[in-house]
Image (cartoon, helix red, strand yellow):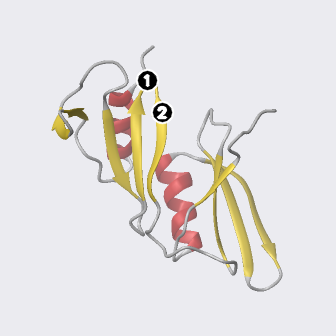
Amino acid sequence: MEWKLEVVPVPVSDVDRAKRFYHEQVGFVVDHDTRLGETLRLVQLTPPGSGCSIVIGSGGAQMTPGSLQGVQLVVDDLDAARTHLIEQGIAVTPIRHLANGEWVDGRGGPWNAFIFFRDPDGNGWTVQERPT
């Protein structure tokens, strides 16, 4: 039996602002923006090439906006990903790696290069470079 991660809920305070951020700035694809009645709205967005999406919304049970931390994306070219985020006006850390349990600027070995950014609510994202 396969267990596939399909959707990660991301708690936000303003659905339209978050949709603009994830779609227009980060570059996620909008799969759907659905309203179910007057109060329930679900927006599903998928990172290009990903089999897993995020969902933002209003009117349902939610976590506190900004409380989601450490969701991780993986890219082939961390420099290009960082440049893209900066060009879109997103504050992003320098490339960092773990050395003796501490974050240090610069790349480490294979699988040990990361950048970090936050959405407008403070939800924290990690982007890791995978070896080619």
- Amino acid type of the residue that numbered disc 2 sits on in the rendered structure: Val
Choose the circle earlier in sequence order: 2 or 1. 2
Q: Does dot 2 land on a helix, a strand or a loop?
A: strand
- Amino acid type of the residue that numbered disc 1 sits on in the rendered structure: Arg
Residue 49 rendering spot, x and y as whole percentages: 62, 32
Residue 104 rendering spot, x and y as whole percentages: 16, 36
Tell me the residue at 60%/37% (across/down).
48
Q: Does dot 1 land on a helix, a strand or a loop?
A: loop
Quarter of the figure with the C terminus = top left
Residue 69 rendering spot, x and y as whole percentages: 42, 58
Total residue callouts: 2
Disc marking residue 74: 2
Relative depth, front residue between 81 and 24? 81
Relative depth, front residue between 28 and 50? 50
Position of 14 with respect to 78 (left or right) is right
Tell me the residue at 23%/26% (across/down).
107
Up-down: is 54 above or below 85? Answer: below
Position of 124 with respect to 53 (left or right) is left
**Residue 120 occupies which quadrant of the picture?**
bottom left
Position of 54 with respect to 36 (left or right) is left
Disc marking residue 130: 1
Relative depth, front residue between 105 and 45? 105
Tell me the residue at 32%/29% (across/down).
79
